[in-house]
Amino acid sequence: MSVTIQDASHVDPRPTKNVLVIDDVPEIGQMYRALLRRVRTANVRATIEVQSARAIELLEREPFDLVITDFRMPGYNGADVVRAVRRTQPNARCILMSGYLESSAGKLPEDGVDAVVAKPLNSAAIIALIERVLADERPPRPSGAPQ
């Protein structure tokens, strides 16, 4: 009989969080992958998607704790993504990023977004925001209710 004993010092006590990043610029997605490795409050599993349509398909079949999406993208925009998140995963958190905040005023969705971030991005501020949003343990949102 064989018994395996795992040293508790090697077990990551942080919760695992699934994060989906959607940006049509591959370099932005890779930057987020690097930033998510620096999150201290959670063990982050990052999925990076450059096509918003494929990201919406992913939302239909995979659970995410946080979705970070660009606003201006070919195909579906950030508002479309936020609506898909609310429809498929009402408890997921959303961060919307845009390099065009002034010109997008009035077009950015207010319901269902936990934060809006202006590009260019400040790494330390983004990490702090992600940690804060992932740690937010609000009660579940009712399905179909705007937030």
Image: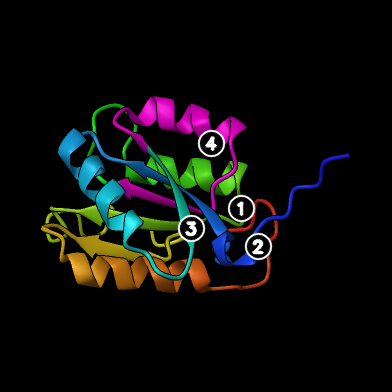
Q: Nearer the viewer, residue 99 or 12?
A: 12
Q: Residues within 10 Å of mark 1 (few under 14, many from 20)?
A: many
Task: Say which label, 1 or 4, has the lower sequence index.
Answer: 4
The quadrant holding residue 37 is: bottom left
- Label 1 sits on residue: 90
Task: Name the disc covering residue 43, or none.
Answer: 3
Camera-near label (1 vs 4) is: 4
Task: Say which label, 2 or 1, has the lower sequence index.
Answer: 1
Give amino acid for label 1: Pro
Q: Secondary structure at mark 1?
A: loop
Answer whether residue 63 is magenta in the image: yes
Residue 126: x and y in percent read 26, 66
- Label 2 sits on residue: 141
Magenta range:
48-69
Q: CA distance from mark 3 to mark 2?
A: 24 Å
Q: Is residue 99 above or below residue 127?
A: above
Q: CA distance from mark 1 to mark 4?
A: 11 Å
Q: Secondary structure at mark 4?
A: helix
Q: CA distance from mark 1 to mark 3?
A: 22 Å
**Residue at point 51% right, 31% down?**
58
**Residue at point 42% right, 25% down?**
54
- Label 4 sits on residue: 59
The reply to whether dot 2 and dot 1 touch (C-beta < 8 Å) is yes
